[in-house]
Image (tube, rainbow, N blue to C red):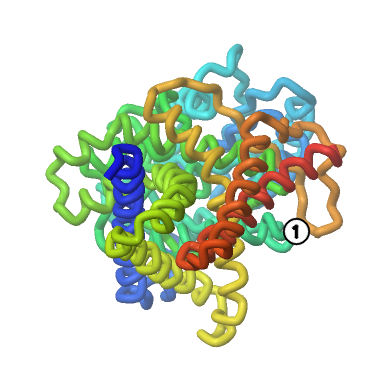
Amino acid sequence: MPIAEATVLVIYGICLAFIFCYSMVQLHLTVLYWLHREKWEKPYIIADPQQAWPSVTVQLPIYNERYVVERLLEAVAAFDYPPERLQVQVLDDSTDDTTAIIEEKLKAWPHLNLQHIRRPERTGYKAGALQHALPLATGEFICIFDADFVPAPDFLKRTIPAFTAPDIGVVQTRWGHLNRNYSLLTRLQAFGLNAHFTVEQSGRSSGGHFINFNGTAGIWRKACIEDAGGWQADTLTEDLDLSYRAQLRGWEFVYLEEVEAPAELPADMAALKSQQFRWTKGAAETARKHLWRVLRSKASFLTKIHAFFHLLNSAIFLCVLLTAVLSVPMLNIRHSAPALAPVFKLGYALLLSLGALIAFYWSAQHARSETAWRTSLRFLPEFFLFLSISMGLSLHNSLAVLEGYMGRKTPFIRTPKYNLIAPGDPWRKRGYRLRSISLVTVFEGLLALYFIYAIVLAFRWQLYGQLPFHLLLAFGFGAVFLYSLFHSRRG
């Protein structure tokens, strides 16, 4: 066998193996979710209203959020919590009129303990702002909300009682979606996030495995932050980084599925790509920082397996991209070397992986539906659209992953939000828009053509085994390319 063909087969096989193992871990989380589902469906018992509530500091990291900051401040000011036990820190690093909006808005609540904190420099971005304000926080607990969230008035009274033991360091809640039905793009984002919060977080919590604070809509015990070393800005996912440092120190995390904090989803492809880049690169940076420590820790073997794939979950995009690109040479090898037909049966691993992912995402969808039948009717179109668009983002996200593993530092680019709720709400003429067209976008268009060529080859050679895979890839890369082009052109 020529060296080139052998290399293709080996790399393709390694990527398939990683995708398969990752899918089996997701399937195990699905099983854990179903085994403990009654726990997540049971409302959390709220403590006696007459109890002595602990002091809480609410931190609101803000950077140029003129469209959503008023909405956030109004929601936090409406918290049903003893005002003498509540401190609100507005961590404002803005360079536009957001600062003036905040100053004017805070005048409406002279009876509340509100601090408008400005730093001379935006050092360390969000992590730097949180760490800068920590010594000024008077609360025993630190509640954090990003600018696009709109928590309910009873949020604190539904979450603080979950700190039932002194070693509980974090209580994380589920994200809701203010603009889920704004567009196809927002519906697919909600589809993916719901699976993370409903099945993944619930499954990890049920199994006693490491989970993560999601950066917002959660509460930290201040002592836990300090014991774990505080907020650090050496990764783009300061939340995942601190989560692992805290759990490696022995702190417990609690996930509350039944408490929802709604937020706004990115409405345009450039904003979505920016968010995905930060999440995937940050996860890779955190894996580079903590993976070896986790593997050497005293955690159980099963917990280490879950942590391994949790920290390396962004590598799935790299494996998907390599599998996709190499699938065309694999098609040629299968056509020109029929004797290798038994080797191609390894491709069935993709079918098993697909089955595991269907179970994972179907379970999350079912949690939001009344019956299994109604779930299934809606599920398949959304699942394959989500899968296809995720594949289409694999080039963009793979570059982020590689940068993270190589230690290349880039600034924290926040995701712009525009206070979009109804489908008719405009975003194209508003500020904060990010660049949509880049060389990566051009290559996404070329990859769409590449997989269309693979579809043509499949019909020419009558080799249809990879045809569904290539159809999803062609559609996914084409959709991501056209979204990027369209959203930029209409700007």
Residue at 60 percent of width and 24 percent of height: 117
User: Of helix, strand and loop, which one carries label 1?
Assistant: helix
Q: Is residue 159 above or below residue 106?
A: below
Does the image show residue 472?
no
Q: Is residue 204 above or below residue 405?
A: below
Location of residue 239 in the rendering, given as x and y in whole percent from the top left corner: 43, 38
**How many residues crowd mark 1 within 10 Å: few (<14), some (14–19), many (20+)?**
some
Task: Tell which of 160 and 171 is nearer to you.
Answer: 171
Residue at 69 percent of width and 44 percent of height: 481
Rendering quarter of residue 318: top left
Task: Tell which of 37 and 303 is nearer to you.
Answer: 303
Residue at 14 percent of width and 38 percent of height: 296
Rendering quarter of residue 355: bottom left
Side of 258 where 105 appears, left or right = right
Q: How many marks?
A: 1
Residue at 45 percent of width and 25 percent of height: 131
Does the image show residue 303?
yes
Q: Amino acid at mark 1?
A: Tyr
Side of 86 where 224 appears, left or right = left
Where's the C terminus, which quadrant?
top right
Location of residue 116 in the rendering, given as x and y in whole percent from the top left corner: 64, 27
Location of residue 150 in the rendering, given as x and y in whole percent from the top left corner: 65, 51
Location of residue 349 in the rendering, given as x and y in whole percent from the top left corner: 33, 63
- Please give the residue where the numbered disc 1 appears in the rendered image: 182
Side of 382 where 101 appears, left or right = right
Task: Tell which of 132 and 365 is nearer to you.
Answer: 365
Where's the N terminus, which quadrant?
top left
